Image: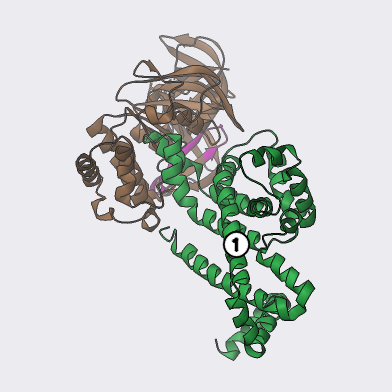
């Protein structure tokens, strides 16, 4: 766009121009904060980054974080998809209460969620005792991390899935039924394929939310250490020198994964 | 044959009240009514999306009230076509046959046959979003017809189309019905559609079936004032029968009298006369069969290709531009409105 053209646009839409300038402050705030850290690490302290890459405890922690969050997302999808469908398609008394309950994990402080999860799942509680009978223990174990992540990431998945189902005209399912599809088949053949993009991006958001969880996790499972816990531990014992390389490594891994996932979301459901 | 027996149901703002209706085998039945009268609700109840609170639905004498939609074998076409956006035209049409687990070879032949007969074979690899409204509607019809339904339900199938496409699809519906003879229920608020397509019309208002008749009867002899004004009977005039002889009543209206064909022999009545049945002239038309009422023109408005003339005697007529020029019909001019005794319909007030 030529400068003259740009100037003409400014004169025509002064408010939008002003808003663009103001809005860019937020974007720059995010970019500079992260870029500053990554840049310093890569350029001035690349040695620390290589050491972190070679440290089995760091690599193990990253793998554990990605894996536990993946499990939490999987559980959220298996239980959350039917829930989202019912919320999108049906009205029932107390529906708005159910919708509010789903949003609660977003609102409450995560340390609070952590205490609640701990008291609910600890071995001395009824639920924790029941699970320990079948060999699943939550305190300081991988399952503790998974339930904490599930708790905080559920709203992201369920809300995205519900919006996805709502965006599909229910008449499509009805027509499918007149053509001989049972309700289950109409769901699998019509609604699910049409909603898949929403479900996928909801799952990506839930997964990302799980990876970033710290407060709720440490209350129930300080060990094994997921990356946020490890960074906190390194920061309090060795300061920036110990924690920053892990932080940068985690960011790079996350970027890489999300770029791939984003690209595949774009590719999916292109047939519409 | 489809029968509804005393069906009552409420859904949001819409309701059906004690609907009893019988559509004969092979009949093209039109449900006519204003917006929000409950027309779509009737179709969706027949298709099985709702179980009525009261009453029963019968398809070929079998009670289907509690049978799920997928077991009813009823074809359904919505106003917005509701094609599956992630499937090609061919996949859309094949859907019903695949659900019925027909062998692959048979599915292919039947889909090809129906596409040929609907002239949409060239679209088979396309996605619905790339089709025009008329093309989408043909695909939706093909998808409903390929399963050989026992009945075909059409929910305002033409109302989202432009006038030219509407006309060609109207012809198409007529042809399909002639060839296949599928019992069809077609919901619309469009009178032209009802007139050209229907074997019989059921008029529905506020969730109630108010008249079921041939198109001629509905349009010329509506049973009440509400239907009359809905089907375009512009002239609804209050009068009083003063005498009756051999089925012809003499009705006094304001300061004039008319002859009307009616079984009624006395009392206060409403007189219905369709505006297109009124002929305007400068002088009085002398004929025993005709009513010829003089009056002053109070307004002239254009109505599509024709003009509507309003007169101070309470009558209005439709005339062509040519007639306006030849007769010199202008506001303030005098004219005679003439119509046959058979062109009137009386109902008790």
- Residue B42 visible in the picture: yes
Residue interval drawn in magenta: B310-323
Q: Is residue B317 magenta?
A: yes
Residue tagged 1: A64
Side of A207 where B145 appears, left or right: left
In this view, B223 is above or below B111: above
Colour brown, chain = B
The structure residue drawn at horizontal position 59% and vertical position 37%, both measured from the top left corner, is: A90
Q: Quadrant of residue A211?
A: bottom right
Q: Quadrant of residue A258?
A: bottom right
Colour green, chain = A
Residue B247: percent from left, percent from top: 42, 11
The structure residue drawn at horizontal position 39% and vertical position 51%, both measured from the top left corner, is: B133
Chain of the residue displaying label 1 = A
Task: Specify the quadrant that holds the C terminus of chain B.
Answer: top right
Side of B273 where A160 appears, left or right: right
Q: Is residue B281 magenta?
A: no
Question: Badge 1: how crowded within 10 Å, few (<14), some, or many (20+)?
Answer: some
Task: Specify the quadrant that holds the N terminus of chain B.
Answer: top left
- Residue B78 visible in the picture: no
Residue B336: percent from left, percent from top: 47, 34
In this view, B77 is above or below A55: above
């Amino acid at each position: 766009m030529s400068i003259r053209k740009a100037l003409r646009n400014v004169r025509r839409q002064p408010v939008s121009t002003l808003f663009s300038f103001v809005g860019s402050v937020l974007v720059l705030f995010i970019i500079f904060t992260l870029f500053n850290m990554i840049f310093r690490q890569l350029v001035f302290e690349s040695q620390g980054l290589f050491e972190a890459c070679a440290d089995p405890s760091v690599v193990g922690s990253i793998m554990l974080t990605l894996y536990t969050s993946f499990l939490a997302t999987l559980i959220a999808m298996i239980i959350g998809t039917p829930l989202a469908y019912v919320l999108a398609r049906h009205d029932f008394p107390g529906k708005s209460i159910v919708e509010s309950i789903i949003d609660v994990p977003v609102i409450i402080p995560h340390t609070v969620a952590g205490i609640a999860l701990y008291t609910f799942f600890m071995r001395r509680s009824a639920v924790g005792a029941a699970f320990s009978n079948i060999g699943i223990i939550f305190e300081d174990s991988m399952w503790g991390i998974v339930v904490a992540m599930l708790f905080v990431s559920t709203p992201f998945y369920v809300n995205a899935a519900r919006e996805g189902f709502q965006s599909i005209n229910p008449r499509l399912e009805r027509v499918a039924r007149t053509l001989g599809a049972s309700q289950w088949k109409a769901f699998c053949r019509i609604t699910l394929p049409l909603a898949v993009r929403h479900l996928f991006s909801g799952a990506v958001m839930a997964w990302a939310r799980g990876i970033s969880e710290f407060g709720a996790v440490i209350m129930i499972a300080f060990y094994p250490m997921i990356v946020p816990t490890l960074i906190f531990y390194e920061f309090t014992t060795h300061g920036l020198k110990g924690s920053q390389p892990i932080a940068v490594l985690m960011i790079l891994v996350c970027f890489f994964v999300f770029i791939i996932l984003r690209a595949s979301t774009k590719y999916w459901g292109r047939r519409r | 044959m489809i029968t509804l027996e005393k069906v009552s149901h409420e859904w949001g703002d819409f309701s059906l009240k004690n609907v009893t209706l019988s559509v004969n085998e092979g009949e093209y039945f039109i449900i006519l009514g204003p917006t929000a009268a409950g027309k779509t609700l009737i179709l969706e109840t027949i298709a099985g999306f709702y179980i009525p609170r009261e009453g029963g639905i019968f398809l070929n004498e079998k009670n289907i009230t509690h049978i799920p939609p997928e077991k009813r074998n009823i074809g359904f076409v919505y106003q917005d076509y509701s094609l599956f956006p992630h499937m090609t035209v061919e996949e859309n049409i094949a859907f019903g046959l695949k659900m019925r687990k027909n062998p692959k070879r048979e599915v292919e032949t039947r889909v090809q046959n129906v596409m040929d007969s609907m002239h949409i074979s060239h679209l088979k690899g396309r996605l619905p979003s790339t089709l025009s409204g008329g093309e989408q509607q043909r695909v939706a019809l093909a998808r409903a017809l390929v399963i050989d339904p026992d009945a075909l339900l059409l929910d305002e199938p033409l109302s989202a189309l432009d006038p030219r496409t509407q006309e060609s699809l109207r012809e198409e519906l007529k042809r399909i019905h002639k060839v296949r003879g599928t019992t069809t229920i077609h919901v619309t608020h469009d009178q032209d559609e009802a007139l050209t397509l229907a074997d019989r019309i059921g008029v529905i208002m506020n969730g109630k079936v108010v008249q079921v008749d041939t198109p001629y009867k509905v349009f010329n002899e509506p049973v009440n004032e509400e239907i009359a004004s809905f089907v375009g009977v512009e002239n609804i005039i209050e009068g009083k029968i003063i005498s009756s002889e051999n089925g012809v009543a003499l009705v006094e209206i304001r300061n004039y009298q008319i002859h009307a064909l009616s079984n009624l022999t006395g009392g206060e009545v409403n007189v219905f006369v369709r505006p297109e049945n009124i002929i305007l002239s400068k002088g009085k038309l002398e004929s025993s069969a005709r009513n010829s009422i003089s009056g002053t023109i109070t307004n002239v408005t254009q109505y599509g290709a024709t003009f509507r003339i309003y007169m101070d005697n309470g009558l209005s007529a439709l005339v062509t531009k040519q007639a306006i020029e030849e007769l010199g019909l202008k506001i303030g001019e005098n004219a005679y409105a003439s119509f046959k005794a058979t062109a009137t319909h009386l109902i008790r007030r």
